[in-house]
Image (spheres, helix red, strand yellow):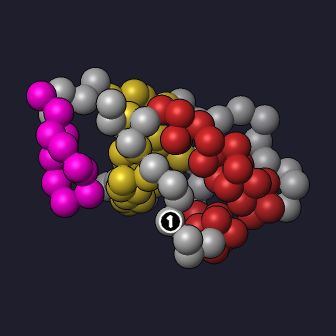
Amino acid sequence: MVYAYIQDVPIGEDLYRRIIDKIGPEPLPGQLVHLCVRQPDGALRYVDVWESEDACTQAFEERIHPAVDAAFGGERPSSEPTVHHLDVLHASGALLESNWS
């Protein structure tokens, strides 16, 4: 089942780009879409869609959290920004092998 969420992050574009550089160019297994969008107030919001929650969890453990730690220079905040899980009723598109309804 597709796993999706929105997360508002308290970082600027420069730190975001450092994190992305640390993650590297190889696609994260199971990640279908990652959008980082600038909101009208300048804050950043992530919109993520994964093949499964397990794929997301594994990517965070293996690549994302180590990249965030490195980008913060070892001084990463102790808590994560709130994740707003999305109740996916339907998902389709070129990156999905099947439709969910």
Q: Mark 1 points at which residue?
A: 27
Q: What element carries label 1?
A: loop
Quadrant (top left/top right/bottom left/bottom right) for the C terminus: top left
Q: How crowded is mark 1: few (under 14 residues within 10 Å), some or many (20 or more)?
A: few
- Nearer to us in this view, 33 or 84: 33
- State which quadrant residue 69 falls in: bottom right
Relative image position of residue 7 (x, y in whole percent):
46, 40
Indicate the position of residue 86 as horizontal and vertical percent values. 32, 29
Residue drawn at x 43%, y 36% as measured from the top left: 52
Decide: is 16 above or below 79: below
Q: Is residue 61 left or right of residue 94?
A: right
Instruction: Mark yes or no: residue 48 visible.
Output: yes
The answer to whether 80 is drawn above or below residue 39 in the figure is above
The amino acid at mark 1 is Pro
Pick the residue in front: 11 or 86.
Answer: 86
Front residue of this view, candidates 94 and 84 = 94
Residue 22 drawn at (x, y percent): 69, 69
Which residue is at a point 16% across and 54% down the rendered structure image? Answer: 93
100 magenta-colored: yes
* Place of residue 26 in the rendered image (x, y in percent of width and height, measured from the top left): 55, 71
Q: Residue at x 38, y 34 (%)?
A: 3
Q: Is residue 17 among the parts visible in the rendering?
A: no
| Magenta stretch: dominant secondary structure | loop
Location of residue 56 with respect to 27 vertically, above or below = above
Task: Locate residue 41 relative to residue 63 in the image: left or right.
Answer: left
Is residue 53 highlighted in magenta?
Answer: no
Q: Quadrant of the N terminus?
A: top left
The region drawn magenta spans: 91-101
